[in-house]
Image (spheres, helix red, strand yellow):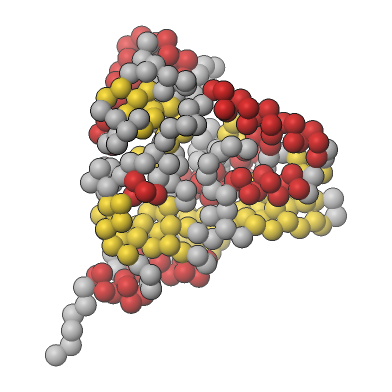
């Protein structure tokens, strides 16, 4: 009699190394999140695509993880497979006067900034201190200090999980907007690698800019506590943190979550915070800002498992 294999066994047959019931709080910068039903670390593009294809074929929901920043995971976890993107090869090439850094989606922004500095390339100094991956930065068009990811990306290779084909998108096809891109709008488009074009410049000046930005982050951001980064997108012509501060909410806490006393657009984990604690603070912030300023704050963080 032919054995009918469970979904777990089928996945494990396809994806050696797959684990079950992995607590996601250990994989997020917030330190919050219940268990993922399945968890798989993809170290190569081949394994990455294989995991997506297996999830699709077995009708298992999947979510792509980078460094787990900019993310709030439900206390109930995720009833699907987390595919953690561990592909992180970063290379530099020069053709004529054009310098290109090609980075796989799991490459750390810190490593990309350091490579650019080593090669005396300018334009990425503003990325210093952002605790994420290039894939996440492109997806959310990460921005800081007047610099944006969309300003430097030349093209992106992506896997279309609907057609199961690899495509290449030029910058204009990526539809970069304020903390937005085509990859955020269309979850079928999953970033594989990114090409960033930079110009040569003064290495000493680049280092000075990096030091300035890191110093600014140190002074203004609550880097000593777990968080998901800024919670809200800044409304036009103002700062979300300023609006929250003017509502008198700095330092307010619910359970183990607190609106940072240092920067009001950060919610920090001051001790075993639950996702529900964070959600309660988010609801409170939105209500107070709407009532006082008639402004609807929009979340920058992504929700998973709710």
Is residue 61 something one can see in this rendering? Answer: no
**Where residue 271 sits: x, y (%)?**
32, 33
In the image, 260 versus 287, the foreground residue is: 260
| Quarter occupied by the C terminus | top left
Q: Is residue 129 above or below residue 244?
A: below
* Residue at (54% x, 17% y) in the render: 237
Is residue 96 something one can see in this rendering? Answer: yes
* Residue at (67% x, 44% y) in the render: 113
* Residue at (29% x, 36% y) in the render: 272
Outermost residue to the right: 96
* Residue at (52% x, 44% y) in the render: 132
Outermost residue to the bottom: 1
**In-image side of 278 versus 221 (left or right):** left
Q: Is residue 9 above or below residue 272?
A: below
Q: In which quarter of the view is residue 245 placed?
A: top left
**Where residue 166 sits: x, y (%)?**
53, 64
**In-image side of 174 versus 233 (left or right):** right
**In-image side of 62 versus 225 (left or right):** left
**Total number of numbered discs in the rendering:** 0
**Where residue 131 sits: x, y (%)?**
53, 41
| Quarter occupied by the N terminus | bottom left
Outermost residue to the left: 1
Q: Is residue 93 above or below residue 179?
A: below
**Where residue 229 sits: x, y (%)?**
46, 33
**In-image side of 59 versus 196 (left or right):** left
């Amino acid at each position: 009699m032919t054995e009918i294999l469970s979904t777990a066994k089928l996945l494990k047959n396809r994806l050696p190394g797959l684990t079950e019931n992995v607590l996601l709080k250990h994989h997020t910068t917030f330190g919050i999140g219940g268990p993922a039903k399945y968890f798989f670390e993809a170290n190569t593009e081949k394994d990455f695509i294989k995991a997506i294809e297996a999830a699709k074929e077995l009708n298992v929901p999947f979510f792509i993880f980078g460094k787990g920043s900019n993310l709030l995971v439900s206390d109930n976890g995720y009833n699907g497979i987390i595919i953690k993107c561990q592909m992180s090869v970063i290379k530099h090439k020069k053709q004529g006067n054009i310098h290109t850094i090609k980075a796989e989606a799991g490459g750390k922004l810190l490593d990309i900034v350091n490579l650019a500095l080593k090669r005396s390339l300018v334009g990425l100094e503003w990325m210093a201190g952002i605790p994420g991956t290039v894939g996440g930065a492109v997806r959310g068009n990460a921005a800081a200090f007047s610099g944006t990811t969309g300003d430097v990306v030349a093209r992106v290779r992506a896997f279309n999980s609907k057609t199961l084909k690899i495509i290449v998108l030029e910058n204009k096809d990526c539809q970069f907007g304020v903390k937005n891109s085509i990859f955020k709008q269309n979850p079928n488009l999953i970033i594989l690698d990114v090409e960033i074009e930079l110009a040569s410049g003064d290495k000493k000046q680049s280092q000075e800019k990096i030091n300035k930005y890191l110093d600014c982050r140190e002074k203004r951001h609550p880097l000593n506590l777990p968080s998901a980064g800024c919670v809200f997108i800044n409304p036009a012509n103002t700062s979300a943190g300023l609006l929250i501060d003017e509502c008198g909410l700095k330092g307010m806490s619910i359970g183990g979550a607190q609106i940072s006393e240092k920067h009001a657009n950060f919610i920090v984990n001051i001790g075993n915070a639950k996702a529900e604690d964070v959600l309660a603070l988010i609801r409170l912030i939105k209500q107070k800002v709407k009532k006082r300023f008639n402004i609807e704050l929009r979340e920058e963080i992504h929700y998973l498992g709710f």
